[in-house]
Amino acid sequence: MVEMPLPDEQKSNTIAFWDRIGIGASTLCLIHCVLTPLLLGALPLLNLSVLHDERVHQALAVFIVVTCGFALIPGFRRHRRASPVGAAVVGVAFLLAGAFLHGPPWGEALETPLTIAGGISMVLAHLLNLRLTACSDCGAGAAVRAAGTGARVARTATPRE
């Protein structure tokens, strides 16, 4: 007999899916930004000059931002914690600045550091969201969900040391 997941389980699975996609895309962005300058001399020999094209960087940044929305908005609605959203806002700002701000007064010197900082921040945002969404009793988030359904939230006492 096949068990159908409950609606909350389906939501958690969907959020986790998008968080994992976001982690993968952000990691790919980090690898791209670190390795491209190192391989810059070899790109023509390897016929990989497309990796240095700004459109690749911009498309990857936009994909990461869209993925962020699919994971973090439903995740926030579930756990009601601001830390993943805050990390994502910082990450998105850095990623978009690195991808789209070029030339004077910015120059290309800031592109790689901004993108690396943004990628790390996005990975952390998705990891936080994944962890908080997977939590079965996330404090305030669980109480808000229970209040919306009329259910009671059982609280367990935690011993203080």
Image: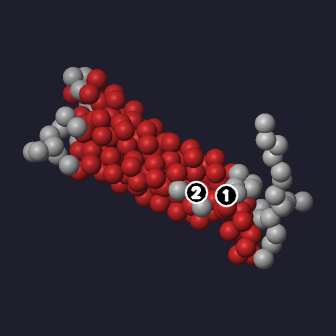
In front here: 81 or 110? 81
Q: Position of residue 22 (x, y in %)?
A: 49, 48
Q: What amino acid is at disc 2?
A: Arg
Observer-nearest of 99 and 51: 99
Name above or below for residue 50 compared with residue 18: above
Q: Which residue is mark 2?
A: 81
Where is residue 43 shown, x and y percent of the image?
25, 28
Whether 19 is drawn above or below 78: the answer is above
Q: Earlier in the sequence, mark 2 or mark 1?
A: 1
Residue at 28% from the left image edge and 23% from the top image edge: 38
Between 44 and 91, the one lying in front of the other is 91
Please give left or right for residue 56 compared with residue 120 in the image: left
- Residue 12 image label: 1
Q: Is residue 9 left or right of residue 123?
A: right
Report the mark closest to the observer, 2 or 1: 2
Residue 122, by quadrant, is top left
Circle 1 packing at 10 Å, graded few (<14), some (14-19), many (20+), is some
Residue found at x 39% / y 49%: 90
Q: Residue at x 14, y 40 (%)?
A: 107
Per the image, label 1 sits on a secondary structure element best described as: helix
Q: Amino acid at mark 1?
A: Ser
Is residue 8 at least partly visible in the picture?
yes
Residue 15: image location, x then y, percent: 60, 57
Is 54 on the left or on the right of 62, as rendered?
left
Residue 65, image quadrant: bottom left
Q: Which of the two residues, 66 or 128, is positioned nearer the viewer here? A: 128
Q: Residue at position x 37%, y 43% from top?
A: 118
User: Which of the 4 image quadrants contains residue 152?
Assistant: bottom right
Callout 2 secondary element: loop
Looking at the rendered image, the quarter that the C terminus falls into is top right
Query: x, y (%) of residue 26?
Result: 44, 43
**In the figure, is residue 123 to the left or right of 155?**
left
